[in-house]
Image: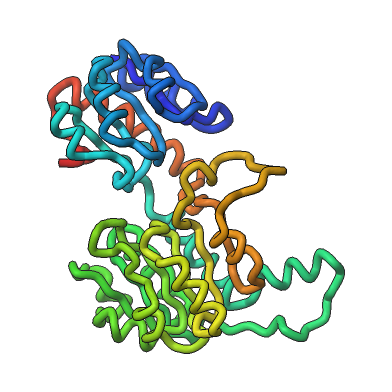
Amino acid sequence: MKMFIYAAREFDEIGYAAEAAEKYGCEFGWTSQYPDMHTAELAKGCEAISFTPCTFDSELVKKFSSLGVKYFTLRSIGFEHVDMEECKRQGIKVSNTTYTPNGVANYAIMLMLMCLRNMAHILKRSEVQDFSLKGKIGKDISACTVGIIGTGRIGATAIKHLSGFGCKIFAYDVFENEEVKKYAEYVSLDELLAQCDVISIHAPSNEETFHLINDESIAKMKNGVVLVNTARGTIIDTPALIRGIESSKIGAAALDVLEKEDGLYYHNRAGEVIVNHEMAILRSYPNVILAPHTAFYTDEDVQSMIEHNFESLYLFETGKDNTLEIK
């Protein structure tokens, strides 16, 4: 069994890949480049490829199929970037990965606290030795009502951990979680939008959640609401977000993900002109935190993502049930 790893990072992933390959009796090759029509040939002779989020259209799926690749093992939970219908037509099995929800959940809470305490603004002013207090006053999360949209593993973990702060917690999901009810009250989306001082998004990216946060939903929010997104950029309509910030309806925003982030995040773009006007506008605001999609990035989570890719190859090849297969 052999896997080829695309967009591999030698400084953190390859060591874990070597451990996982030995554990599951696999071989692997790797490149720091992303999969495309030119780099596809590198995977010739491999049963599986592993890659991080990138555009993976039907032509690219067919290219890898023609090279004999049978499995796509994604180093991400989301799979919206892959043409799944073409994978089915080509008979390619696809799996995603998983990791402990603690990293992203705790990162989201960190962003909430940073927004509520104006920490990004405070740090910028401290860099120029402005230690005055005016304009730095914050809010205590314990006195806030926090809303969590999406109560899967990560959202549910965020709720559990938030409960220790003593804040009131509202939750919204089409599927209610009994464990979540120990710490939060399920309400309608409209009620959550209207009642919460802080709103954190933990929903998947799909047709139902595309631009879930838009002009209409923002209008329903409390004045000065804090908005946090560690899920997927497409859930927020970015121009609507900008309008919400400029009208002061949104008091602060922290975004670990952004629309049109492909080809941007995870690359060193120092000294380059980045053609992303919405990103440039958001970066200009003192009450906005833009983090480059790093909520997942802990040593535990990276190791888990890599190991699950090799586990999927082993399970696919041995004909055993793979709970991470996307069907």
Instruction: Depth check: give the residue in front, 75 or 57.
Output: 57
Taking the image as shown, residue 249 lies to the left or right of residue 75, namely right
Instruction: Depth check: give the residue in front, 79 or 60.
Output: 60
Looking at the image, is 309 positioned above or below residue 276? above
Q: Is residue 304 visible?
A: no
Looking at the image, is 70 positioned above or below residue 125? above
For the C terminus, the image quarter is: top left
Looking at the image, is 276 positioned above or below residue 237? above
Please name the residue shown 58% across and 30% down the image.
11
Instruction: Depth check: give the residue in front, 267 or 239.
Output: 239
Q: Position of residue 218 (x, y in %)?
A: 40, 80
Please name the residue shown 35% across and 80% down the image.
216
Q: Is residue 200 visible?
A: yes
Please name the residue shown 86% across and 69% down the image.
129
Taking the image as shown, residue 323 lies to the left or right of residue 203, namely left
Instruction: Depth check: give the residue in front, 294 or 103.
Output: 294
Taking the image as shown, residue 6 lies to the left or right of residue 81, namely right
Residue 153 sits in quarter? bottom left
